[in-house]
Image: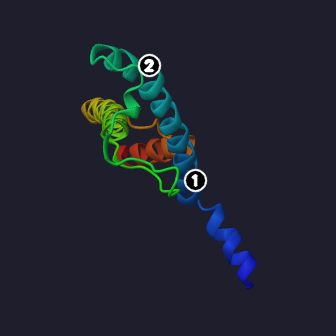
Amino acid sequence: MSIFSEFRQFIARGNVVDLAVGVIIGASFGKIVTSLVEQVVMPPVGLILGQVDFSELKIVLKPADAAAKTAEVAIAYGAFFNTVIQFLIVAAAVFLMVKAINAMRRSEAEHPAEPAAPTPQETLLTEIRDLLKAK
């Protein structure tokens, strides 16, 4: 068996495909949450705190020097705060999703599926057995 056919079998497995779909959806969800935080949640929070752009909040340790061509050194706590809020939104969404899945599993466990109806062969064999017992 060649390495390419082994690789193709590996990729075709359901769990690898499911993982790939999960990663793609997770990345897209991350972009949505980033947009939600930066463009919807943080502007009102920044307005309340008296700042227009919350992500620009920082503590400047050393200002930029154009003559020496050195960049500014700063602690960007506003960007960190944005990231923390993004994490909390993602964590809440995952929590709600897991809670819904667990509730669905609990309801399935409380109401087990009814046993399948016997096949025609099973029905015929049961009738034959009952006839033999009657003799």
Label 2 sits on a secondary structure element that is helix
Dot 2 crowding, Cα within 10 Å, few <14, some 14–19, many 20+: few
Q: Amino acid at mark 1?
A: Ala
Quarter of the rendering occupied by the N terminus: bottom right
Q: Which residue reaches farthest front?
A: 67
User: Which quadrant holds residue 49?
Assistant: top left
Q: Earlier in the sequence, mark 2 or mark 1?
A: 1
Q: Give the percent coordinates (x, y) of residue 84.
A: 31, 38
Q: Give the percent coordinates (x, y) of residue 13.
A: 60, 62
Left of 103 or right of it: where is 22?
right
Label 1 sits on a secondary structure element that is helix
Question: Which one is nearer the viewer's eye here, 120 or 111?
Answer: 111
Dot 1 crowding, Cα within 10 Å, few <14, some 14–19, many 20+: few
Q: Which residue is mark 1?
A: 20
- As drawn, the label of residue 40 is 2
x 44%, y 19%: residue: 40
Question: Which one is nearer the viewer's eye here, 76 or 115?
Answer: 76
Q: Give the percent coordinates (x, y) of residue 72.
A: 42, 49
Left of 56 or right of it: where is 96?
left
Q: Amino acid at mark 2?
A: Val
Left of 29 or right of it: where is 2?
right
Display colour scheme: rainbow
Left of 50 or right of it: where is 128?
right
Q: As displayed, is residue 1 above or below residue 27? A: below
Question: Which one is nearer the viewer's eye here, 7 or 86?
Answer: 86
x 45%, y 28%: residue: 38
**For discs 2 and 1, the disc positioned in front in the rendered view:** 2
CB of mark 2 within 8 Å of CB of mark 1? Answer: no
